[in-house]
Image (spheres, rainbow, N blue to C red):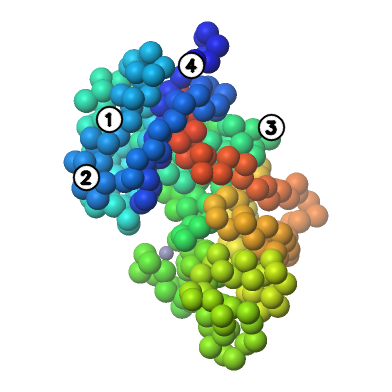
Amino acid sequence: MAGTAGDALAIGIDVGGTNIRAGLVDDDGSIHDREQVATPDDAEARMTAMLDLVARLSERADVDRLPVGVGAAGLVDLDGVVRYSPNLDWRDAPVRAELAAALDVDVRVENDAAAAAWGEYRAGAARDVDGGALMLTIGTGVGGGLIMDDRLIRGNAGIGGEFGHLIISEGGARCPCGNRGCLEALASGTAIGRRAAAALADGGDSALRDVDEVTGTAVTRAARDGDALAVEVLAEVGCWLGVGIASLVNSLDPGVVIIGGGVLSAGSLFLDPATEAYHARVIAREHRDVAPVLRAELGDDAGLIGAALLALARHA
Ligand SMILES: [Zn+2]
């Protein structure tokens, strides 16, 4: 059941604020089996849950000692220490060392958005693209990942690639990180909800007046039904995303830009204004191949697929 003979296999684990999702993944990025549990609040229980998922997947596949890759929401350093996680209580937690000691296998731990970027690069939207890829995962917040020269770029300590905290409007909206005007503060699902609420407070006419909570999801739904205020908000927030993409492309020159996360449900209502704003700001536009904006293809599986593929990719 574990694929054709000769496939290299790994177990990928995506630790989110709500669920821990794990999969048995081959070196093409195909998922052969999967498991999921609710994420325990307690760090020790979380470790036990991860070990249990590995044990169950290994037992069903009748293989043991597979390499393990983990994508975790937070700042993860080069040693696989989760230095800080905004949603979980990991603080300087040696997740890689603890898993490796318990399992006696190679373990790799990366930021969840970086793992998702690797998944899309190897097995998703950018699998047939030559050159590096930059991915932004846009949901409640904004995560990022960068691949250059077939390597995941993580910076000096490993905690780089936090493109959600690229400051694009000094003095702009407050970001959960403490700064103002970050990409995450201006171009996330949260930002969409907040902009729409402000437009309603200004007296704007919209079907959103009848919803209980003006979230990014509610705005997207209204925009798809043709609500003019909601369409305008998606275009405005999309424009900020385009400013961020242009800044990143001008500074990093990736081969492609991949957009993933819940915001994809807004489709072209969000991505077309973003692409237009990006194209208007990319430098030397007539003298370069402008990196295309691609939609992510792996959905919620990108993180666990990417984590497993990173566990198999010793060079990256
Ligand atoms: Zn920030």
Q: On the image, numbered disc 3 is attached to which residue?
A: 128
Q: What residue sits 38% from the left and 13% below the top? A: 62
Q: What residue sits 42% from the left and 44% below the top? A: 112
Tag of residue 28: none
Q: On the image, numbered disc 2 is attached to which residue?
A: 43
Residues under numbered marks 2 and 4 in contact, where contact means CB atoms less than 8 Å apart = no
Residues under numbered marks 3 and 4 in contact, where contact means CB atoms less than 8 Å apart = no
Q: On the image, numbered disc 4 is attached to which residue?
A: 2
Give the mark nearest the N terminus, 1 or 2. 2
Left or right of 163 in this view: 219: right
> Where in the figure is residue 206, as x and y percent of width and height?
64, 82
Marks 2 and 4, how far apart in space? 31 Å
**Which element is circle 1 on?**
helix
Q: Is mark 3 within 8 Å of ligand 1?
A: no
Q: What residue sits 35% from the left and 40% below the top? A: 37
Point out the frontmost of discs 3 and 4. Answer: 4
> Where in the figure is residue 276, as x and y percent of width and height?
73, 63
Marks 1 and 4, how far apart in space? 19 Å
Q: On the image, numbered disc 1 is attached to which residue?
A: 51
For badge 4, the amino acid type reads Ala
For badge 1, the amino acid type reads Leu
Q: Is residue 250 visible?
A: yes
**Which element is circle 4 on?**
loop
Q: Residue furthest left?
A: 44
Where is ligand 1, by quadrant?
Answer: bottom left
Give the mark nearest the N terminus, 1 or 3. 1
